[in-house]
Amino acid sequence: MTQTSESVTWLTQAAYDQLKAELDYLSGPARTEIAAKIAAAREEGDLRENGGYHAAKEEQGKQELRVRQLTQLLENAKVGTAPASDGVVAPGTLVKIAFDGDEDDTMEFLLASREYASADFETYSPQSPLGAGVLGKSIGEDAEYELPNGKKASVKVLDVKPFTG
C-alpha cells in the first residue's frame, strides 16, 4: 500500500507499523543473535577456512543492508489512508487485468512499492511499465505499456479494489 513518488513513500499505518517492527527486530535482537554466531564461529579456529564464520559475516552484511533500506524508507515515509473504493487504479489497490482484451487471459496484482510485496499477490511498482500504464485507469478502460523488448502491450482493467492486507 505504498507509492513512491520521487523520494517520498506513501504507506498506510499498517504497512508503516509492519516495516517499523521489522526494523526494530533487525536493529535489536537480530543484531545480538548474529554477533553471537560470529563470536562462536571465531572460537572454532582459523578464520580463513571457517565456513560458519564466513556465512555469519555474509548474513550480517545482508541484515545491515536491510536495516539501511528500512531506515531510509521509513525516514521518507508519509503515512496516509488506504485508497478509495472508487474503481480507479491507485497505489495500494488490487488490480485485475485482461491481456490484449482477452478476458480469459487475466492476472491480478497489487500496485504498491516492492517493500510491501505480498506472498499472496504479484506486486508491481507504480513506476514499473505495467504499473505506470494502469495507474489512474478505471474499470473497463484500456491501458498500454512498453515491454522490455520495446514493443507495446495493451491490457483492460477488469476490477480494482483496495488492498486490505
Image (cartoon, helix red, strand yellow):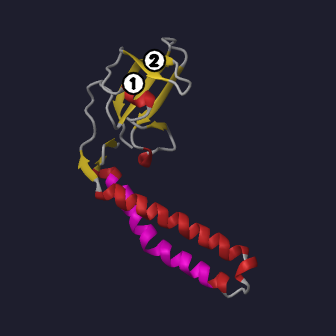
Front residue of 148 and 111: 148
**Residue at mark 2 to residue at mark 1: CA–CA distance:** 9 Å
Task: Rate crowding at label 2 as few (under 14), some (14 to 19) or many (20 or more) other CA atoms within 10 Å.
Answer: many
Residue 91 image position (x, y, % from top left): 33, 36
Placement of 45 over or under 116, stated as above or below:
below
Which residue bears the numbered disc 1? 133
Task: Rate crowding at label 1 as few (under 14), some (14 to 19) or many (20 or more) other CA atoms within 10 Å.
Answer: some
Which residue bears the numbered disc 2? 155
Nearest to N terminus: mark 2 or mark 1: 1
| Overall secondary structure of the magenta section | helix
Residue flagged by tag 2: what amino acid is it?
Val
Placement of 115 over or under 42, stated as above or below:
above
Residue flagged by tag 1: what amino acid is it?
Gly
Residue farthest to the top, as pictured: 101
Residue farthest to the front, as pictured: 150
Residue for point 50% across, 40% down:
120
Residue 3 image position (x, y, % from top left): 33, 41
The magenta segment: 16-39
